[in-house]
Structures are given as C-alpha cells and as structure tokens.
Amino acid sequence: MTQITSEALSHEAHTSEIPLSWRRYFSFSTDHKVIGIQYIVTAFFFFLVAGIFAMIMRGELITPETDLIDRTVYNALFTMHGTIMLFGWMFPVLAGFANYLVPLMIGARDMAFPRLNAVAFWLVPVFGSLFILSFLVPGGPAQAGWWSYPPVSAQNPSGQWLNGEFIWLLAVVISGVSSIMGAVNIVTTIVRMRCPGMGWFKMPVFVWTVLAAQIIQLFGLPALTAGSVMLLCDLSFGTTFFDPAQGGDPVLFQHFFWFYSHPAVYVMILPVFGIFSEVFPVYARKPLFGYKVVAISSLIITGLSAVVWVHHMFASGTPGWMRMLFMFSTMLISVPTGIKVFAWVGTIWGGKLRLDTAMLFALGGLINFVFAGITGIMLSSVPIDIHVNNTYFVVGHFHYVIYGAIVFGLYAGIYHWFPKMTGKMYYEGLGKLHFWLTFLGTALNFLPMHPLGLMGMPRRVASYDPEFAFWNVLASIGAFVLGMSTLPFLVNVFAAWIAGKQAPDNPWRAIGLEWLVSSPPDVENFEEIPIIVSEPYGYGKSEPLTENMGG
Amino acid sequence: MTTLDRAINQDKLHHSSHVIAQEHEHDEAGNSMFGFVIFLLSESVIFLSFFAGYIVYKTTTSDWLPSGVEGLEVREPAINTVILVSSSFVIYIAERYLHDKNLWGFRFFWLLTMAMGSYFLYGQAVEWQSLKFGFSSGVFGGTFYLLTGFHGLHVFTGVLLQGIMLIRSFLPNNYEKGQFGVEATSLFWHFVDVIWIILFVLIYVWQ
C-alpha cells in the first residue's frame, strides 16, 4: 500500500493526495475511487432523509383521517420524498458505482477527466442541501409532486420571489449539470480509456450497462433542463409557456418532463442489470449466460427508451393513434429486458449457488423485478392504464421497480464490492438479517399498494375512505420495517469499515480486473496496465483473463 | 513453438502493447475533444427541445402575435446572420494559420472572428431595443426571447472563450500540448452558427 511508483509521483493530480486517510473523503480528491465512495456515502445520506419523509407519510396514512400532519406538509413530503430519492440518492449512488468500478474494470488508472469528476461530485451536496433547505423558505418547499406539473407548480402561493418551487427548479438544473458532467466523463472513459486487449466484447456487462445508461443521460437530460428553464420563467419572469389561459400548453411540459424522466428509469436500472450480471456468475460459479446478447440488449433498451415517454400521458388528452403507438413501443421494452432475465436465470440454472448476502440481494432483486415488469406490461396497456391512472397501483408498480429491483441491486453491489472498496470484510450474519428485513419490508410495504390501486385509491392524498384502511395499515407497517432494515446495514458497514477483518484481494474467487488488484486498490489502480486476453466470466474455464497479471 | 520462442514472443507482445498502453493513456487532448463533442451533442438537445416547443406553439396557438405586433423585421437580422455565418469561415482561416505556425495571422483572423461575434451581439441588442413586445408578451414573446437569448448567451460564451484563447496565444509554449483549446472553441463557434441558421429559419423566415 505504501508503494508509490515513480509514475504515480510524477502524476500531478495525485501528489497532493493524503494517502489512505479518512480525511481524503472530505477533500477535493480527483481519485475516481475516492469520488466513487464520496458519491455512494453522500447519496446514502439523502436516501435516509427521503426515507424518513416516506415513514412520516406512512405514519399519516395508518389511519384514514388527516391526524398526524397538515395536508400542505404532506404535499411537501411526497414531493421532496420523490425528488430527493431520485436526484439525491439514485443518480449519485449510481454515479458512485460507475466511478469506482468502470476504470478498474476497463484497466484504466483513472477517469478521463479527474477534475471534472470531482466538480460533478461536489455539486451533489450543493443541490441536495438546496432541496432540504427549501423547507425553511416562506411557504415551504415545492408541493407539486416530483414531476412538478404546471399549472400546480407555477402557482407560487407564498408570493415570494424565493419560494420552494424556485429552489426546486434551481436544484434540478444543478443536478442536471452534475449529471451531464458525469455522463461526458464516463462515456469518454469507456470509449477511450480501455486497456489493450479490452475490445467491446471483452468488457464486463456492468461497463456496457453504464455506457447505455449514460448515453440516455446525454440525450434525455437536456429535455428536462429545457422544460425546467421554461417553467422557471413562468414561475418567476412572467412568461406563459405552460399557462393555457394565455396561449400556453401545460401538456408540453409533460412531454419535456417524460422525455427524460421515463428514460431516467433505465438510467437507474441499467447499471443494476449490470450488477446482477456481475454478481450471478460469481455466486453461481458459471459464466454469464448469453454474454453478448445481454450486452447488446442494454443498447437496445437505450434506443427504445427514447420512444416510450408518452405512456405516462395516456390520460393527458393524448390522441388515439399516439396511444396505440406508445403502447406498442412500451411493450417492446419487455423484449430486451426479458432477454436479460432469461440470461440470469440461465446463469444460475444448475449452478453451484453460494447464498452470501450479495447473492441474496441479487436473487431478491430479480424476483421483485419480474413482478414489477409484469405490472409494467399491464400499465403499458391503454385500457388498464386509464383505469388505474393516478392510483396506488402505479405507486406500487414503480416502487417495486425502484425499491424492489434497483435498491436491492445496489445493496447487492455494495456487499459484493465492499471488501474491495474498504479492504475489510462485512459481517455475513448482519448482512443476512438486513436482507430478510428488506425483503419482508418491501413486500409488506409495496404489495398492498396494488390492490389499493385496483380498488381506486388515488395517490398523493393524506386522507382516504375507511374501506382502504386494511391495506394501508399493512403498507405502513412495511414502511417501518424498511426503515428499521437500514439499521443492521449501517451497523454492519460502520463496524466492518472500522474494525472488520482484513479482506483478501479476491474474497469471492471472482474473475475480473478489479479482483486482481489489492483491496483497496492503490491510488493508480494497476502497477502495470493489464493486457486482456480472454472474455469476461470465464468460470469453469482455465484460461487467464490477462496476459501480464494472470487472473 | 519452443518455450524460448514463446517467451521471446510474449516479451515482444508485452513490450509493444505496453507502448500502446502508454499512448492510450496519455492521449489527453483526444479525450478532451471526444468529451467536448459529446457535450455539444447533448447541448444541442436543449436547443432541439426549445425548437420543438416553438413549432408546437406556432402551429397550435390561436392568437400567435400579441396585439399591436405585425411580425418581425427581417432585414437587420439577415445582415446579422450573414456576419455570424461568415465568421465561421474566418475562424477556420485563423485555425489554418495556427496550423501553419503563423501566430500573427492566427491572431488577426481570430480577433476578426471576435469582432464579428461581438457585432452580432450588438445587432441583437439593438433589435431587442426596438421591439414592441417583451419576454412576458404571450408565448410569442416568451419563445422569441428564450430562443434568441439562450443562443445569444452561447455567442457571448464563444466570444469569451475566444478572448481567453487569444490571451493564451501570447504565453510561451502554449501549443506544446496541442491546440485543444483553439480547436474546441472553433468547433463551439460552428455549433453556435448552425443553431442560429435553424433559429433564423424558424423565427424570421417562417412567419
């Protein structure tokens, strides 16, 4: 660890580094591994904040009456819950994984633009704090839901120039700037920094999925930025872009919003598909089934994601031909995702399964994803969508995607790479307790939302008809279980990080470049740039991965 | 193949790919240009969104022009357009001079580009002054100022970048690590130009 090669010394960006001290996580570091962990830890903080918002909401919903909090506060909470979960937790945590893993997996010493990388990260605490601080302005934070539809979002009830919605839009734009910086950096790194021998079809699937996801950021995010800027003008500078009374068109905002925010779901889930594809082969001791097809299907998802957004607007006066078209394109998405699901099942089929925590989370995530995918296909069908539009069925569906599949995948990733990132082993018992609490909590919290939605309970309400009480009580209990489930996780990572057993370089006997370097890796990752000679996931084959480093 | 042969071959391969690895890593200018191009592609989607919005408004709004407004004067903006589009050729000449290591030729044409860009901004300011409608005059006023303003901000950024590149051209050994700054600024300028042509057609020609 103390070895510093002459090359490392000459590398200007890294000389100011305080080697391996916890302080570097609070510095403007340009090391992709430090930035990766900075992203993940910061994001987890926002995950807890937005999770507490959710628990307060579920506390309100445990009885049919409005008895815990004011309706306005409830509106603010569901708005900020969704907003912070997506912009504060999802995108940063995934940027963290991409940052940490991509250079290691492609055999590079760092990202293409290390300083840009650090700037992109340090914008996260800035816009994250803006979201939280917006609770302090007169009139409270934004209350128009995470989608911020006008005319609700353009109302500005407090009459102040500095209002919650203004801060919301500002923070979303800053988040967009950060994400674009990250996307430019990650795509450039993957396209141009691969080590010798690392052809496209020698890249691990995680790298493929990150590439596919970041391409979506590049073409999708600017549309949300455009919509946000126009909404900001309506709110603060007197324009009428989305005001139908003065020639504006509120549905246009929905187009801008969903042109990005539907593909954004793939930005989130594609890297998780990557994590599944990395985890299953290791714990099943088999090569990934259909590697090339899995890799290519990621790019097919990217392509299709650009032409499905109107399925969020079936009830927004969308003409019939457009409904049909987008119903069809949305259903098509199930083909490349189905390919992946079959590939994972094919991978674990007949394998020698080792049910460590990472594998449990990956399996749990896969089960939840299949369920979420089925309700997704139901929703893509226009008649069903119109029936359950704006009900808890939709809420249940996307929480199964985002919590059931994506958060599970992220936990799988954290456990799987924890020894690599920290150099310490986590505690398996606590990990398993965490998994079972999370799995149970997810089912209890989000399954009841489906019958509720079919019965007709609308989303975003603080009070409801007493006939919905039973399922709501279950969901609320589930929410508290989920809240509690983070405790064994936090205890586990803190205790292991501080006092855990030293991790070997490759505790899972996994195949991959990141497992050929020390745990944690040196500042420059590799003593010598690796030369790749075989395809990834060579489990059960005896060929080495690299020419010069073995594997 | 004998073991010795294999060892030699391995060593050769090893050596050559090590050199490749080194080059690979240190092509920073190439990385920067690649990153800049994909950034511009991403940036163009913001303009495309605004253009799409404009087309939707233009084709669906019943009272498109605010009362008392007849339409837009085309003559002055057309002159402005000619100047901005020509500056794309001038900046190309400047780049050629730099390529031939003629620094003063580069500086002259580079400064000329800056002057043309600045004149464009001046012309737009004069036009804005003379208009009878504002940012909040319905969607017509809103989209007009949003599009021309957002584009103008890009022209301003371009001129600013050109100024920085001009100053840096006086630094000794400025071009030792390649000319990424100049090339990127020039590419950005062409980008701003192309966007303006689309914008001019949408707003001024299609009335």
Image (cartoon, coloured by chain):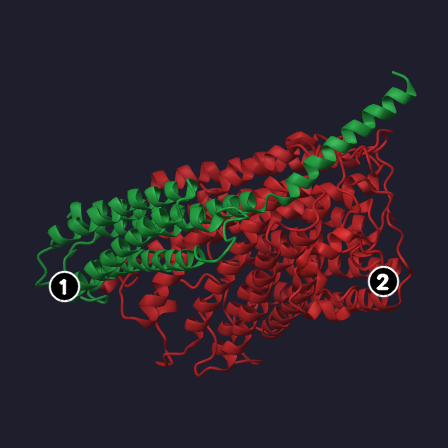
Chain colours: A red, B green
What's the chain of the residue with tag 1? B
Check residue B131 in the rendering and tell me which mark sits there, or answer none. 1
Q: Residue at x 91, y 61 (%)?
A: A501
Dividing the picture into quadrants, the one containing residue B155 is bottom left
Q: In the rendered view, would you say B1 is above or below B149?
A: above
Q: Look at 48% across and 47% down and name the residue there.
A: B179
User: In terms of depth relative to the viewer, which is nearer, A250 or B92?
Assistant: B92
Query: Which is closer to the viewer, label 1 or label 2?
Result: 1
The local crowd at label 1, few if under 14, some if 14 to 19, many if 20 or more residues have their Cα within 10 Å, is few
Give x and y (percent) for residue A138: 44, 83
Side of A298 relative to A242 (left or right): right
Q: CA distance from mark 1 to mark 2?
A: 69 Å
**Amino acid of disc 1:** Leu
Amino acid under disc 2: Leu
Q: Which mark is residue A430?
A: 2
Residue closer to the observer: B21 or A54: B21
Which residue is at the front of the view, A81 or A65? A81
